Amino acid sequence: MAQLPVSEKMRPALALLVKHHFWLLAAVVPLMLVPLLFIAKGRFESQITAVRNQIKGYIQSLETIRKITQHPNDAWSSDIDTSTMRVKRETFAEWRRFWEAQKPFRTWPESLGPDFVKAAEALKPDGNLSRKLLERYHNTVRTLVRELPERMGVAESMVDANPGGQTRPLAPRPVQQPDFMPPGSMPSDGQLQASPYFFTWNQENQRLIYTSFDWEKAPTTTRVVLAQEELRVYGLFCDSISRVNKSGSGPHNVPILSVDELLVGYPAAEENPGGSFGGRITRPATVSTGGPEGMMGGMMGGMMGGQMGGMPTDMMAAGQPGGAALPAMRPPNPQFMGNAAGGQPAGMSGMSGMGGGPPGEGEGAAAVVSPDDMLRNWAYVDFTGRPLDATQLAAAADAQMVHLVPFVMRLVIDQRQIDNLLVDLAMTPLPVDVRQVRINAAASGPASGAMMSQAPSGPASAIGRLYDVTLELRGTVGLATPPNEKAVGLTPGQANEAASEDAGEKPAAAPAKAALLGRPNRRRTSS
């Protein structure tokens, strides 16, 4: 082994180090190991604290789960399935009660014959009536329509009889206005035409309704069902107006002096429901300032009767960059297209997309092919008032249980009797939801041919009716649909099965009024 040379001077020191090395190491080693020990201990403590906190977190999570009474296990899943099935059964039971509650309303006229009534009452949603019964309804429906004025308590002016005994829709006649009389004065007996009726129903409106039921060919089963539904709703409003006017003893004090417009279904549906797309604010007509351009603008404004100058500013902005969305285009409906009674119904010509052409033309017709499907176009609306075409109606979840039929009424009424009319509508056998109440508003809609005056005049003022106003009501009528177990997630017959698993569970308290099927308890008012 090689040896390192050591200096003579270092030999004594080295000998001393070898002799006392133990004591020297005993003093040096602790000075080196103690700091290292403290450093290692701190690191271990931090790791232990982190792991301890992690374990505590897991324990707390387990405690939270342990406190849950029903864990998501097999028993919990079974309870959820049981509760879900109970809700489905309760929903279907409420739907069935709603359907049965309207059974007295779904009657068929006895004039159609007992065999027709029996077949119609037993008709399934996908069933069909025989050809003989369809032809019988075709021959009877006009008479059924002509019964509406009598139910309201006004003179019928739907048809004229010609020498051959046939009937045809009445042509418009000019309204004879009496001479102006000071408010509060009464005309003489010679100035008032003798009539057993105290109020009137606009002849054009009667003609429009009659024309929509004057069909060239025998109808399909779908048209018969929808037409009879429409007649029932018309009868509902005629009866309500008649009840309100029972308190009157003559034209001077009858609550409703005239019914200017009454429409349900397709012609009552609004392209712009409730002004949701604008149309409530109008811009004054442009006034000519001289010069060729100003003169031309004034002439155009006069020729258009103020329609161009009075175009709603929010409607003018619609469709422009940053403007509101445009209203829906009215799709075609065979009931209000050309027919044997004189073509398109009066008051509906010139309306965009009103279905003046044959099926398959124009916007809105591409998605609907079947004429029976087209009969459902805009016959109903959703809960926001938006009209539904046949495709949207089939896909709407709300429409599975209830069909909302839109309606519009515009009449001249003693303003002190408005509440009585609204109360009577609220007490009808069907849920009538009045969504718009407008007083002395400009007429609008497919059947309104002219703007209403801002205050009653003419006959109303002439016979001293100082409190008359023009009232417009818009809303919906809720019609129950046939209960369908599949629509609520039940198999046929499952709604009537006894559920033993429900016995141990306390059923939820039934609401005082079903949110979907009950009578609406709100009324929106817009001016």
Image (cartoon, helix red, strand yellow):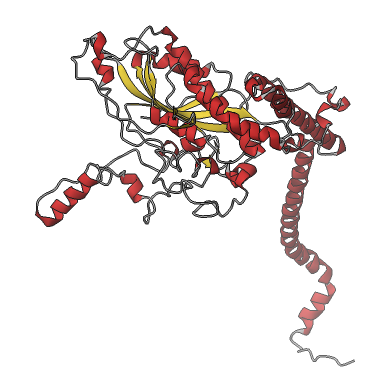
Q: Residue at x 80, y 64 (%)?
A: 26
Whole-percent x, y for residue 519 in the image? 57, 22
* Residue 398 in view: no
Residue located farthest toward the right when viewing the structure as drawn:
1
Quarter of the figure that contains the N terminus: bottom right
For this rendering, which residue is in front, 443 or 174? Answer: 174
Q: Residue at x 76, y 43 (%)?
A: 56
Label count reads 0
Residue 277 in the image: above or below residue 401: below
Q: Is residue 125 left or right of residue 475?
A: right
For this rendering, which residue is in front, 444 or 135? Answer: 135
Q: Is residue 213 left or right of residue 395?
A: left
Whole-percent x, y for residue 300 in the image? 21, 49
Q: Residue at x 24, y 16 (%)?
A: 462
Quarter of the figure that contains the C terminus: top left
Residue located farthest toward the front when viewing the structure as drawn:
164
Residue 465 in the image: above or below residue 454: above
Q: Is residue 188 left or right of residue 477?
A: left
Q: Residue at x 52, y 27 (%)?
A: 145
Residue 241 in the image: above or below residue 141: above
Whole-percent x, y for residue 297 in the image? 18, 51
* Residue 280 in view: yes
Residue 4 in the image: above or below residue 300: below
Whole-percent x, y for residue 404 in the image? 56, 32
